[in-house]
Image (spheres, grey):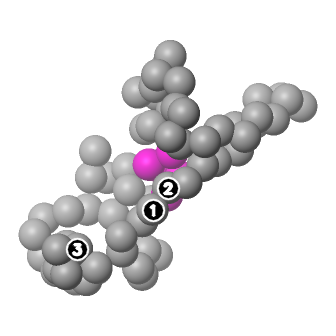
Amino acid sequence: IAATTSVQMVRDRGHRFAEEIENLPIILGGYEEVQGKKSESIDIEMFNLKGGTRKVTAIFEALGLGDDL
């Protein structure tokens, strides 16, 4: 478990993510979804799976984790 906090160890195991990521693990608690002028706060625990794959992919891309998908 301790190895998951080491960015270099995680990279050495073949995971790919943005060079800007300096700390692991990345913990998601919620996010703000904006469409036009409408904005909605989303609690990750209450995540609606309608369109979920696109949303999760977009979240991972924004966090710099897209290369590992």
Residue 11 screen position, x and y as percent: 20, 73
Give the spatial CA distance, label 3 vs label 2: 16 Å
Question: Circle 3 is placed at which residue position?
Answer: 4
The reply to whether the C-beta atoms of the residues labelled 1 and 2 are less than 8 Å apart is yes
Residue 29 screen position, x and y as percent: 55, 54
On screen, residue 14 versus residue 68, left or right, reads left
Which residue lies at the image location 45% right of the left edge and 62% below the top edge? 27
The reply to whether the C-beta atoms of the residues labelled 1 and 3 are less than 8 Å apart is no
Question: Circle 1 is placed at which residue position?
Answer: 27
Question: Which span is picked out in magenta?
Answer: 58-63
Give the spatial CA distance, label 1 vs label 3: 12 Å
Amino acid type, label 3: Thr
Which residue lies at the image location 22% right of the left edge and 74% below the top edge? 4
Residue 47 screen position, x and y as percent: 52, 32
On screen, residue 16 versus residue 46, left or right, reads left
* In the image, farthest residue toward the top: 50
Labelled disc at residue 28 = 2
Q: Is residue 59 magenta?
A: yes
Residue 60 screen position, x and y as percent: 44, 48
Q: Is residue 66 magenta?
A: no
Against 60, residue 16 (above or below) is below
Labelled disc at residue 7 = none
Which residue lies at the image location 85% right of the left edge and 29% below the top edge? 38
Q: Quadrant of residue 12?
A: bottom left
The reply to whether the C-beta atoms of the residues labelled 3 and 2 are less than 8 Å apart is no
